[in-house]
Amino acid sequence: MDTTVKKEAAAKVPFLDRPIVRTILPIAGFAIICGLFYYLTNGRLFSSKSLGLLMSQSYMLLISSIGVFFIMTMGGLDFSQGSMLGVSSIVVCYLSHYNIVLAIIGGVVTGGLIGLINGFFNVKRKISSFIVTICNMYLFRGVCAYLTTKSPVYGVSDISKYNNLPFMMTFTVVIFVIAWLVFTFTGLGSRLKAIGAGETAARFAGIRVERTKMLVYMAAGCITGLAAFVNSVKVGSVTSTAGSQLETQIMISLVLGGMPISGGAKVRFYNIILGVMTYKILSGGLVMLMIPTQLQQLILGIVFLGEVALFSDRNTGMVVK
């Protein structure tokens, strides 16, 4: 009897909403993209030199995606990441002339403060995260442009010495491991998923929703501050375009990794790595094929729209908080 009921319940679930399908689709998409560009580039995209270049371009995106992953898990969005990274990078470059550890702390604190502003207007003023972060994206992009009007802000002359594979890989892996441990073993992941599934139910379950959301927005900003250090090390200076389009890259990456826009229980931590790697191979392959920039944007837009349609949660009918 129980087996019959379970089969009937499973049959009612739409094919694309079944857990096994939602798990396999992004992995299959990654495999298809790898195979397609291996064929189209005659294997050049997967040479050791090309893969090394792709990895060096991925560290900043990998780190900054962690904070947005936390925010999206609880059903929010953050479009201020690019300008947040730009302002934080200015602080990192400026303070690097005094002390590199002080520069990292300065970048983290700057990002945390901007994240706190996002959290305040979203949580305390009840403004949608989409509206708040779009406004702050323009606000802090203006701050970044103002601070770099006369000339770029340069880091200390030897800051590029940290731009090497052992340091960058270790720095990124350590941040990932800490984030994974916190998300998986401290109960934070369960609380964020509960908030993403429904704030009212989360409150009845005893979760302090407002405090959790404020802390997550601040933590996401701090993580972006770490990404700003990676950006400063790689580039060595900051211009008004620093972090431009980063928020779009993060959104496309996470969705490519199989993350539902509305967050909730279907979120998985591996969505970050899988999504960023898929995005980087896709964008790197398009560049290697010398496809015009406008056509690249069109292709990425179509892929993004298709992935959103696939991984949106059609059962809850939720809107972005």
Image (spheres, rainbow, N blue to C red):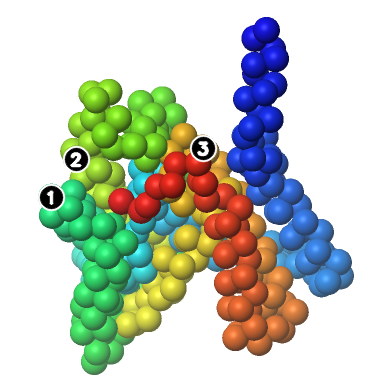
Rendered view: 303 above or below 211: below
User: Label 3 is placed on what type of residue?
Assistant: Lys
Mark seen at residue 266:
3
Tag 3 and tag 2, C-beta contact below 8 Å: no
Total numbered labels placed on residues in the image: 3
Mark found first going from the N terminus, 3 or 2: 2
| Residue on which disc 2 sits | 210
Rendered view: 87 above or below 112: below
Q: How far is mark 2 from mark 1, CA to CA?
A: 8 Å
Please report the residue visible at 24 percent of the width from the left and 92 percent of the height from the top: 150
Badge 1 marks a residue whose secondary structure is helix
| Residue on which disc 1 sits | 124
Mark found first going from the N terminus, 3 or 1: 1
The image position of residue 252, as x and y in percent, is 53, 62
Q: Residues within 10 Å of mark 2 (few under 14, many from 20)?
A: some
Mark found first going from the N terminus, 2 or 1: 1
Rendered view: 163 above or below 180: below
Mark seen at residue 142:
none
Near-viewer residue (164 or 190): 190
Badge 3 marks a residue whose secondary structure is loop
Tag 2 and tag 1, C-beta contact below 8 Å: yes
Q: Residues within 10 Å of mark 3 (few under 14, many from 20)?
A: some
Please report the residue visible at 39 percent of the width from the left and 29 percent of the height from the top: 190
User: Label 2 is placed on what type of residue?
Assistant: Glu
The image position of residue 72, as x and y in percent, is 40, 49
